[in-house]
Amino acid sequence: MKAKARRFGIFVGVLLFWLGVWTLLSVWGGQELLLPSPGAVAAHLWRLCRTSVFWSNVLASLVRVLLGFLSAAVAGTLLAMLTTRFTLAHHLFSPVLHIVRAAPVASFILLAYFWVRLQLLPSFIAFLMVLPLMWANVCQGIEHTDPSLLEMAKVFRFGRWRTLREVRLPSVLPYFEAACTTGLGFAWKSGVAAEVICSPPFSVGKEMLSAKQYLETAEVFAWTVAVVLLSVCMEMTVKTVIRRRKGGRA
């Protein structure tokens, strides 16, 4: 309990410190157009939250990002199982996934603009950006499974399902959790970037672009804060679900 209170106190202290730095920079700059104050951003965010348009845009973007992220989680896990089991599959897919991980996200957005329907493009980009991360982490989890535990499972004739549930999954889950928490941030960044460029209807990215065109810097910041809060909430939800699953198996 004390450790939690201490962590919370540190979090609040760090948050207040950076809000203070932001406020000072805004005051010294003297121009809300360049760097609006935290108060101005909070006021814009509050005003946005009171409109139905805000929630429609947030919900649409949330669905797109979740679709891309969940698809990447499933595909990345299946690919990891395939490439760790079959050498040929590893040689076939590994170079492609490394290229996808290294290439700039803007390149994929511009290319996919010609291939994918406008509404699905942000989901497709989020999928592409998260897939290599999921694949690499799950591969590490599979490869780092303790051989002695696998040997024990074989000796005691656990069977495939019990070996998967009691040996392989506990080894892979920490890597999968790390991929999920990092991947959610990737999914939001790449998904919203795709929305900014392709501007599908009912999207956070389109609203950010519109605010930028009208020089509403505080509104751009407000939408950014909304995306960050959504990403953090989703990350906490995923962590909670995974940890409860761990507890349930224990």
Image (cartoon, grey):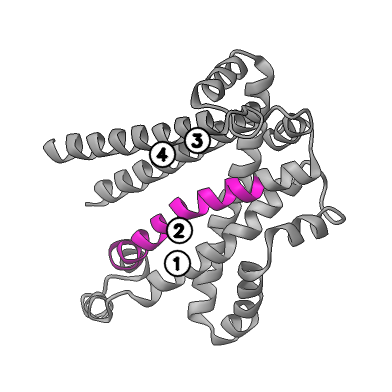
- Distance from disc 4 to disc 2, alpha carbons, whole Å, reads 14 Å
Which of 37 and 132 lies nearest the eye of the viewer?
A: 37
- Residue 77: tell me if it is visible: no
Q: Nearer the viewer, mark 4 or mark 3?
A: 3
Q: Position of residue 3 (x, y in %)?
A: 15, 41
- Distance from disc 2 to disc 1, alpha carbons, whole Å, reads 8 Å
- Distance from disc 4 to disc 3, alpha carbons, whole Å, reads 34 Å
Rendered view: 231 above or below 137: above
Q: Amino acid at mark 4?
A: Thr
- Distance from disc 3 to disc 2, alpha carbons, whole Å, reads 35 Å
Q: Amino acid at mark 1?
A: Val
The quadrant holding residue 102 is bottom right
Q: Amino acid at mark 3?
A: Leu
Q: Which residues are magenta?
A: 164-191
Q: Residue at x 57, y 81 (%)?
A: 90
Give whichever of discs 1 and 4 has the lower sequence position.
Answer: 1
Q: Which residue is mark 2?
A: 179
Q: Amino acid at mark 2?
A: Ala
Q: Which residue is mark 3?
A: 25
- Residue 124: tell me if it is visible: yes
Q: Position of residue 177 (x, y in %)?
A: 39, 55
Q: SS at mark 4?
A: helix
Asked whether 198 falls inside the magenta stretch, the response is no
- Distance from disc 3 to disc 1, alpha carbons, whole Å, reads 42 Å
Give whichever of discs 4 and 2 has the lower sequence position.
Answer: 2
Q: Tell whether label 1 touches label 2 (CB within 8 Å).
A: yes
Q: SS at mark 1?
A: helix
Which mark identifies residue 237? 4
